[in-house]
Image (cartoon, rainbow, N blue to C red):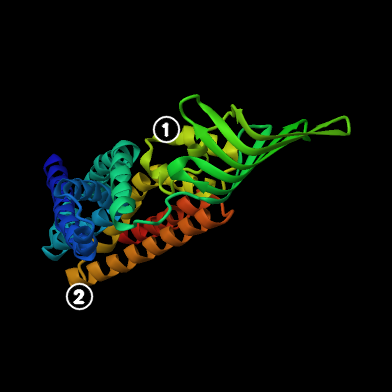
């Protein structure tokens, strides 16, 4: 049986590798055809383009990892079925569960690599990929929230900035509120706040402070005042893709800090975190579905199996994207959005596997 295991495992990994080598260059060509005009228009250096497509390869592969694997398993398993090799295996007394074992071993290897890729390599690639896009391809577009920035700094302090200018770390119409035991103690207003890097303090223009003590209000005003606050302006409005660029440990700290600040983007960050775990699990689910669908010899041959497989893959992507957007744009629980497709397709995998055994 070790010969059978090794035979299937080699086909599993080799076909998956070939699928990556086939589709990644196609993805690069399509992306280059779409963006080459802007690259030439902005005189992008060749070296930066080369590094961009290196990052693009990792980013693209990580994004579609399960689907590449799914199609590759359907492809080579359908060939086994058409050559009646699967019938020969099962007729020799091998159970379907035993026949599935090398697939699970292969899925474990790929899932382990996908986990490592998502935790450490993909964030590095995402950093370079997104920085290139906003530097050369999306010039003029803000990568941060710059209007009506409202953040909780800690348990007692809140700030508001009507307009934030990232390049100069400057905010307009600034408000700072300090609470103790849910009671407002003082409130600071300023027409403008900017960070003085040399002294590590903030300069407030048209400074007004209203303090409240036992029902008595006092007002302090100055044209200009230097103050020390427990925050950095640029940290209050992280870039749109901030979560994608952090390793898992950094991501956990980042999400905890954003929760303390009351960030409106927690759903988006939670989706990124949970997908690092859900993607490796989806590899096992899609592998089982692919084997169950393609292990039977059909009248249409490999074409029918591929058509069924592509349809299942598109439905999976649809569920994944729709629920992901719901979690990012609303209060829909991120854990439900990320794991719902895996739960549904996990049930489908069990059902198809039982039918395949019969």
| Residue under the point 46% across and 62% down | 322
Of mark 1 and mark 2, the one earlier in the sequence is: 1
Other-residue count near label 1 (Cα within 10 Å), few / some / many at <14 / 14–19 / ≥20: few
Residue sitting farthest toward the bottom: 299
Pointer 2: residues within 10 angstroms few (<14), some, or many (20+)?
few
| Location of residue 254 in the rendering, given as x and y in whole percent from the top left corner | 48, 35
Spatial separation of the CA atoms under disc 1 and disc 2: 52 Å
> Residue beneath label 1, please?
250
Q: Is residue 77 visible?
A: no
Q: Is residue 121 above or below residue 16?
A: above
Q: Quadrant of the N terminus?
A: top left
Report the front residue among 39 and 5: 39
Question: Farthest residue in the right direction?
Answer: 215
Q: Residue at x 19, y 65 (%)?
A: 33
314 w.r.t. 49: above or below: below
In the rendered view, tell whether residue 301 sits above or below residue 259. below
- Residue 299: mark in rendering: 2
The spot of residue 201 in percent (x, y) is 54, 27
Q: Position of residue 269 (x, y in %)?
A: 47, 45
Tag 1 secondary structure: helix
Q: Nearer the viewer, residue 29 or 66?
A: 29
Q: In front here: 335 or 246?
A: 246
Q: How many marks?
A: 2
| Secondary element at image label 2 | loop
Question: Is residue 67 visible to us here?
Answer: yes
Circle 1 or circle 2, nearest the eye: 1
**Of 18 and 213, the residue lying toward us:** 213
Q: In screen coordinates, is 294 left or right of 208?
A: left
């Amino acid at each position: 049986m070790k010969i059978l295991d090794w035979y299937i495992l080699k086909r599993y990994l080799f076909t998956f590798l070939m699928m990556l080598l086939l589709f990644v260059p196609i993805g690069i060509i399509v992306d280059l055809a779409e963006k080459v005009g802007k690259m030439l228009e902005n005189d992008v250096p060749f070296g930066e383009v080369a590094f961009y497509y290196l990052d693009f390869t990792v980013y693209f592969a990580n994004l579609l990892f399960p689907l590449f694997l799914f199609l590759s398993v359907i492809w080579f398993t359908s060939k086994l079925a058409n050559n009646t090799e699967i019938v020969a295996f099962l007729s020799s007394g091998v159970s379907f569960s035993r026949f599935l074992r090398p697939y699970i071993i292969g899925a474990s290897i790929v899932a382990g690599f996908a986990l490592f890729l998502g935790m450490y390599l993909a964030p590095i690639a995402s950093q370079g990929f997104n920085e290139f896009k906003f530097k050369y391809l999306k010039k003029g577009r803000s990568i941060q929230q710059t209007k009506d920035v409202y953040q909780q700094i800690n348990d007692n302090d809140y700030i508001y900035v009507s307009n934030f200018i990232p390049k100069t770390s400057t905010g307009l119409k600034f408000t700072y509120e300090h609470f103790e035991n849910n009671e407002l103690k003082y409130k600071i207003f300023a027409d403008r706040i900017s960070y003085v890097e040399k002294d590590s303090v903030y300069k407030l223009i048209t400074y007004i402070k209203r303090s409240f003590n036992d029902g008595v209000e006092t007002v302090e005003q100055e044209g200009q005042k230097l103050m020390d606050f427990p925050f950095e302006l640029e940290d209050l409005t992280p870039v749109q893709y901030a979560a994608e660029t952090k390793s898992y440990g950094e991501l956990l700290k980042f999400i905890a800090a954003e929760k303390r600040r009351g960030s409106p983007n927690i759903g988006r960050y939670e989706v990124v975190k949970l997908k690092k775990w859900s993607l490796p699990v989806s590899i096992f689910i899609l592998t089982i579905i692919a084997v169950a669908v393609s292990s039977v010899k059909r009248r249409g041959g490999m074409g029918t199996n591929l058509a069924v497989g592509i349809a299942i893959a598109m439905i999976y992507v649809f569920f994944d994207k729709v629920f992901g957007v719901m979690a990012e744009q609303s209060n829909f629980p991120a854990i439900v959005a990320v794991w719902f497709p895996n739960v549904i397709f996990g049930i489908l995998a069990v059902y198809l596997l039982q039918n395949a055994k019969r």
